Image (cartoon, rainbow, N blue to C red):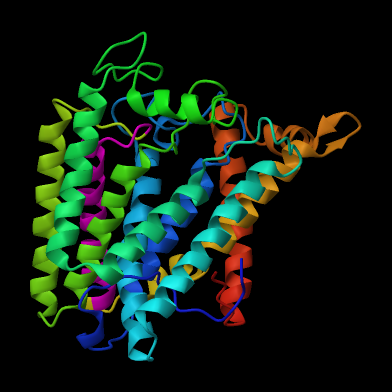
């Protein structure tokens, strides 16, 4: 990741050149910070056999609060992308400059995500290729191209085509040995494509990856919904109109997602179209609450810790991910660092293994907050 003093937004924006510059959305920084803190929390359980259900992913269909974290961040990427592009265009950057920056940024994100997987266990024959940062890189780049070179109507058509087209592919295209429309882990089309192209390089070896190739298509739609939200918030409408629009769109997303769930179940693992609409609806609601409380009412003090996370999200995510990997990879007297620390300092804290596991996860959030606070205090904002 490149280090510079940052704007905390990623690119976006359609009528970018003519839009007026405005103060950044503090609520968006806070929302991003909550999302990153949540991501660190759910990724670092002390004992994966004893995790409270809200901090676990749904086994397959359905959702838990944990299943909201990743789509929320992808949605935020879309919102931020608009605000960043607006700011850069106002400074005189051309579309070509913005595109080259998007290419560079995406490449760095992809490589960093790949290296996080490779740390301590690098093997070209088995290293996982997809991943969280890799998906963000691809989605960010393709969404940037759409924002730079198409208008709102075209982007709306693309988003609808991605959601409907993905649904049709998943339920109509037969998978060898299973047939069409089998949406199990082994029988779904997205998993089959990933096994065919990346057999040894998946999250579950030879079987499945939740950040695979085909399921990245509806993730682009998630980001585009964030783009439309960013453009709405950049409009000249009054704050009350913007707030009403956020809540109205939230209701539409939630209802549409639940209806589509009947035929194409809400499922984070294969990022179903119903999941896109439902999670976007919840993201719009959460952002609306933050926009009302922070940007309209001016209640900002409570949000400061989350803003500290929100202005340096990727570096905090990478540090937490690397730290977790390092404690698994490195050994002392035949035991991993995590086993030693967890057993000696955390297990004695409670007789309830669920509580102990949660305390371990919270310790990761606290360590990350200490880094976030130090960076924020020195006004260091790290971006790619």
Query: As drawn, which residue projects farthest toward the top?
Result: 177
Q: Residue furthest right?
A: 333
Q: Is residue 341 visible?
A: no
Which residue is nearer to you in this view: 233 or 359? Answer: 233
Magenta region's main secondary structure? helix
Q: Is residue 191 left or right of residue 287?
A: right
| Residue 25 place in picture, x, y as percent | 31, 76
Residue, far bottom: 91
Magenta extent: 269-295
Give the quarter of the image for residue 238.
Answer: bottom left
Say which residue appears at 11% left-offset and 41% top-offset.
Answer: 256
- Where is 90 relative to 341, above or below? below
- Residue at image position (29%, 73%) is 294
In the foreground, 302 or 351: 302
Q: Quadrant of the N terminus?
A: bottom right
Residue 11, x across and y down, in percent: 37, 71
Is residue 95 in sight in this rendering?
A: yes
Location of residue 104 with respect to 272 vertically, above or below: below
């Amino acid at each position: 990741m490149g280090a510079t003093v940052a704007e905390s937004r990623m690119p976006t924006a359609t009528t970018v050149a003519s839009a007026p510059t405005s103060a950044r959305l503090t609520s968006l920084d806070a929302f991003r910070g909550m999302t990153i803190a949540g991501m660190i929390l759910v990724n670092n359980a002390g004992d994966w056999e004893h995790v409270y259900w809200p901090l676990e992913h749904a086994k397959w269909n359905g959702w838990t609060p944990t299943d909201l974290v990743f789509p929320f961040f992808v949605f935020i990427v879309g919102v931020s992308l608009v605000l960043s592009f607006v700011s850069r265009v106002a400074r005189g950057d051309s579309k070509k400059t913005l595109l080259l920056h998007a290419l560079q940024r995406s490449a760095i994100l992809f490589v960093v995500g790949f290296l996080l997987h490779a740390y301590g266990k690098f093997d070209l024959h088995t290293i996982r290729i997809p991943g969280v940062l890799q998906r963000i890189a691809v989605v960010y780049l393709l969404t940037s191209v759409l924002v730079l070179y198409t208008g709102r109507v075209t982007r709306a058509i693309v988003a609808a085509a991605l959601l409907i087209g993905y649904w049709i592919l998943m339920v109509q295209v037969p998978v060898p040995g299973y047939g069409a429309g089998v949406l199990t882990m082994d029988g779904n089309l997205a998993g089959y494509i990933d096994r065919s192209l990346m057999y040894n390089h998946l999250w579950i070896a030879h079987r499945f990856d939740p950040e695979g190739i085909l399921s990245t298509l509806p993730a682009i739609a998630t980001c585009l919904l964030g783009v439309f939200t960013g453009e709405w918030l950049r409009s000249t409408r009054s704050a009350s109109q913007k707030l009403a629009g956020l809540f109205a769109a939230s209701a539409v997303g939630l209802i549409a997602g639940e209806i589509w769930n009947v035929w194409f179940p809400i499922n984070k693992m294969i990022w179903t179209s119903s999941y896109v609409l439902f999670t976007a609806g919840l993201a719009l609601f959460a952002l609306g609450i933050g926009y009302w409380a922070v940007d309209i009412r001016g209640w900002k003090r409570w949000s400061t810790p989350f803003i500290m996370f929100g202005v340096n999200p990727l570096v905090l995510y990478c540090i937490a991910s690397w730290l977790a990997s390092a404690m698994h990879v490195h050994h002392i007297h035949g035991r991993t660092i995590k086993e030693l620390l967890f057993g000696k300092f955390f297990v004695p804290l409670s007789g309830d293994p669920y509580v102990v596991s949660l305390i371990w996860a919270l310790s990761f959030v606290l360590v990350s907050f200490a880094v976030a606070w130090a960076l924020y205090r020195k006004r260091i904002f790290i971006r790619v």
